[in-house]
Image (cartoon, rainbow, N blue to C red):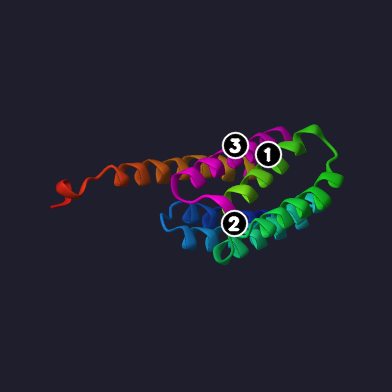
Amino acid sequence: MMLIAQLIGIAAFFVGIYGFLQKDDIRFRVLMALYCFVMAVHFFLLGTQGTAVNVAINGIRNLVSIKSKSKWMMLAFIGLILMMAVPNIEQWYEIPPVIGSLLTSWALFSITGVPLRLILLSSSCCWLLHNVLAGSIGGSLIEASFVVSNGISIYRMIKESQVTPAAQG
């Protein structure tokens, strides 16, 4: 079972990296939803149901945020995370991923572009801290890769926004 869980985690790794390399917000959100669903299976197989539930909620949230920017939807997802993730916290280092999920929930329904990616970068740092402290080698590698690939995308997006029409001509 552990081997299957790790293979699923590796598959999620590739989906997530591909997602963070996207500049298009819709494509990015779809791929990140897929990543979340694969990670939910991974965490479930590893026996961490609270984290699996949190990540599954995040996947649904990512999809809903494509079509809706409703503050009510944002509040609903924040409420779901608080009701379903917080009661499952067993160690203090499980708090940062909840904070990351809450920040991401706000960001997906409120902002786009570089500001969105900066919040997601912060969220990845929260998850990275958790995974390092929890001793999750695979999870740590995934989040460290997200930090790097998201940083590359942020850099590319900022660089492209600095191109003036005169320089394009």
Q: Secondary structure at mark 1?
A: helix
Residue type for callout 3 = Cys
Q: Quadrant of the N terminus?
A: bottom right
Q: Secondary structure at mark 2?
A: helix
Whether 62 is among the magenta residues is no
Residue type for callout 1 = Asn
Disc 1 marks which residue? 131
> Can residue 2 be seen?
no
**Residue 3 vs residue 167: left or right?**
right
Residue 32, image x and y in percent? 56, 57
Which of these two is toward me, 12 or 30? 30
Disc 3 marks which residue? 125
Residue 63, compared with residue 168, is above or below; it is: below
Whether 137 is among the magenta residues is yes
Q: Secondary structure at mark 3?
A: helix
Asked which quadrant contains residue 126, the reply is: top right
What stretch of residues is rendered in magenta? Answer: 109-138
Q: Which mark is residue 12?
A: 2
Residue 111, image x and y in percent? 52, 50
C-alpha gap between disc 2 and disc 3: 18 Å
Contact check, label 1 and label 2, Cβ < 8 Å: no
Which of these two is toward me, 136 or 130? 130
C-alpha gap between disc 1 and disc 2: 15 Å
Return the disc, 2 or 3, that comes first in the chain's sequence. Answer: 2
Residue plotted at (71% across, 53% down): 75
Residue type for callout 2 = Ala
**Residue 163 vs residue 6: left or right?**
left
